[in-house]
Image (tube, rainbow, N blue to C red):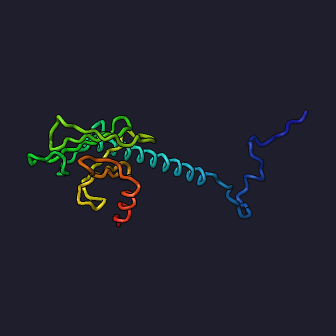
Amino acid sequence: MAVTSRDMHTTPAWSRSRSPRVRGPMMRPRSIRPFIWFILVIQVAIVIYLLVSQAIGLGQSWIDDLRYGNPRTAHIAGFVGHNEAHNQPSHFFALNLDRQVVVLEFPGGDASNVRTLVGPYLFGADADRHPVMLDLRDVDGDQNVDLLLTVRDEQIAYVNKEGTFRLPTGEEWSTIQQLQP
């Protein structure tokens, strides 16, 4: 039996040479990282948008709660020619009672002669939280102050005829439309 000597290194002899290896141009493997970052940034932007939208909505509701209370209530006073013998203005309170608009009139400030005007029923999301605004001005050109109700950017006119407020007739409505700019 013959004994042979061998090199015990694990690397082959040809790889231990010091000559530099020449390689061709390497192509970087395509990375999906930029795409993942793009998707992540879009998702974060959407979440931020949703959070800011919710915060703005809650803030507006909180401001309306402070300004109009709950149920939504508004008040205006003015001389409209109803029982104002003692030089006291009539007082008007507009309420949004569970989506039903109601206007209370205290003619001449007298609480014993309260008149009620039933307004529209409101539809839609959070309709019970919309404030009702009041304004007093002549809209039909008859020199009597009329009552304007504003809810959700819509106006309803109550004309002042014969000592009370009522919805306008078709002829009165066409006159109102002609007088508006």
User: Front-most of 68 and 133?
Assistant: 133
Please give left or right for residue 8 compared with residue 41 in the image: right
Residue 128, quarter of picture: top left
Image coordinates for residue 92, horizontal then vertical, percent: 23, 44
Image coordinates for residue 83, horizontal then vertical, percent: 16, 45
User: Front-most of 26 and 115?
Assistant: 115
Image coordinates for residue 75, horizontal then vertical, percent: 22, 45
Image coordinates for residue 16, horizontal then vertical, percent: 72, 52
Please give left or right for residue 152 compared with residue 113 in the image: right
Answer above or below: position of 173 versus 103. below
Answer above or below: position of 120 versus 171. above
* Image quadrant containing the C terminus: bottom left
Q: Residue at x 29, y 44 (%)?
A: 63
Q: Residue at x 56, y 53 (%)?
A: 38
Q: In the displayed orientation, state which residue is furthest to the right.
A: 1
Please give left or right for residue 100 compared with residue 112 in the image: right
User: Front-most of 94 and 160?
Assistant: 160
Residue 55, quarter of picture: top left
* Image quadrant containing the N terminus: top right
Q: Residue at x 17, y 51 (%)?
A: 79
Q: In the displayed orientation, state which residue is furthest to the front.
A: 162
Q: In the displayed orientation, state which residue is furthest to the bottom.
A: 181
